[in-house]
Image (cartoon, grey):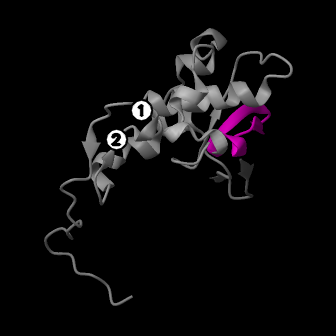
Amino acid sequence: MSNYESGTTRTIGIDAERLAGKTFDYQHDLSLVEDVDLLAATPGEDINWLEDVALLVEDGVPAVFDRYSNSFIKIYFPIPEGREDEIARKVLVKHLQSGNSYGIRLKEQHAKFPQPELGPWVERSRTVGEHWTPPEMPEGWERSGH
């Protein structure tokens, strides 16, 4: 964040805990992600999508980027040397499987076609988006000509 002369604050990046209003246990405890099987959690056993997932740093804290909510998941536990990207991937998969990704939480209301709520990372996830309808303007409002 950076401050302007007016005293307002501008947010450059956003993190998952800001969207959720809390942190998650797996952000603080390595043992809660150690058992994540990346291959088993990968759609169609195509682990190539994980090659783009790497440990990053956000606000001076190790983090992994959740592209489904366009936010960072900060990692607050010590990461063993040489396992940086693996741990980042496990934290991301745990976040997605837990349904804590803000992008996943929005699916029920905004998905325009049937899809697994928790994505392909969770077997037998319920389906959302089967009955999408476009939003309607509140009574008394009109669409602008723009």
Q: Around disc 2, counting alpha carbons within 10 Å, would you say few (fewer than 14), some (14 to 19), or many (20 or more)?
A: many
- Where are the magenta residues, as a range? 49-65
Image-quadrant location for residue 46: top right
- The three-letter amino acid code for the residue at tag 2 is Glu
Q: Nearer the viewer, residue 115 or 21?
A: 115
Marks 1, 2: nearer the viewer? 2
Query: Is residue 59 within the magenta segment?
Result: yes
**Element under disc 1:** loop
Q: Position of residue 137 (x, y in %)?
A: 21, 71
**Element under disc 2:** loop
Q: Position of residue 8 (x, y in %)?
A: 64, 53
Name the side, left or right, on which 30 lies relative to 103.
right
- Residue at mark 1: 99
> What residue sits 77% from the left and 15% below the top?
78
| Cα–Cα span, label 1 and label 2 | 8 Å
- Residue at mark 2: 117
Image-quadrant location for residue 117: top left
Q: Are marks 1 and 2 in contact (CB under 8 Å)?
A: yes
